Image: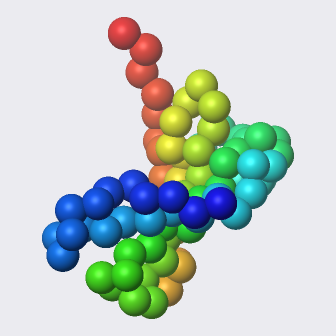
Amino acid sequence: MTYREEAAWNEAEDLSEVLSITASESVGGFDCGGQCLELRAFSPMDPGVNELKYWLKGVGKLLEIKAETGERNELIEVRCP
């Protein structure tokens, strides 16, 4: 399934594609255990640029990986109010 994240024509046309609802990733003290939502984020305005994003229910976004470079942006802690 592919859906629009943003639709400001000629400014931001971000899309995401669901790759898996049972992805496994771990960062810091968080482990998906096969329960992560895995998305591929992309935009027709930047062809060839892709990010993989991993979300865990009840926590939020755990990890972003720039597909072209392997650069990782990882969740390091969660604070509850």
Q: Is residue 21 above or below residue 16?
A: above
Residue 77 visible? The answer is yes
Q: Quadrant of the N terminus?
A: bottom right
Residue 43: image location, x then y, percent: 38, 75
Q: Is residue 52 above or below residue 69?
A: above
Residue 65: image location, x then y, percent: 51, 68
Judging depth in this view, the residue of 1 and 40 nearest the camera is 1
Residue 67: image location, x then y, percent: 53, 79
Q: Residue at x 70, y 45 (%)?
A: 36
Residue 21: image location, x then y, percent: 75, 49
Q: How many marks?
A: 0
Judging depth in this view, the residue of 4 and 62 nearest the camera is 4
Furthest residue toward bottom: 48
**Residue 26 vs residue 46: left or right?**
right
Judging depth in this view, the residue of 32 and 19 nearest the camera is 19
Colour mapping used in the image: rainbow
Q: Residue at x 42, y 21 (%)?
A: 79
Furthest residue toward left: 11
Residue 71 visible? The answer is no
Q: Is residue 46 above or below residue 51?
A: below
Q: Residue at x 59, y 25 (%)?
A: 58
Quarter of the image for residue 56 reads top right
Q: Residue at x 45, y 90 (%)?
A: 48
Q: Quadrant of the C terminus?
A: top left
Q: Is residue 43 above or below residue 25?
A: below
**Residue 74 vs residue 5: left or right?**
right
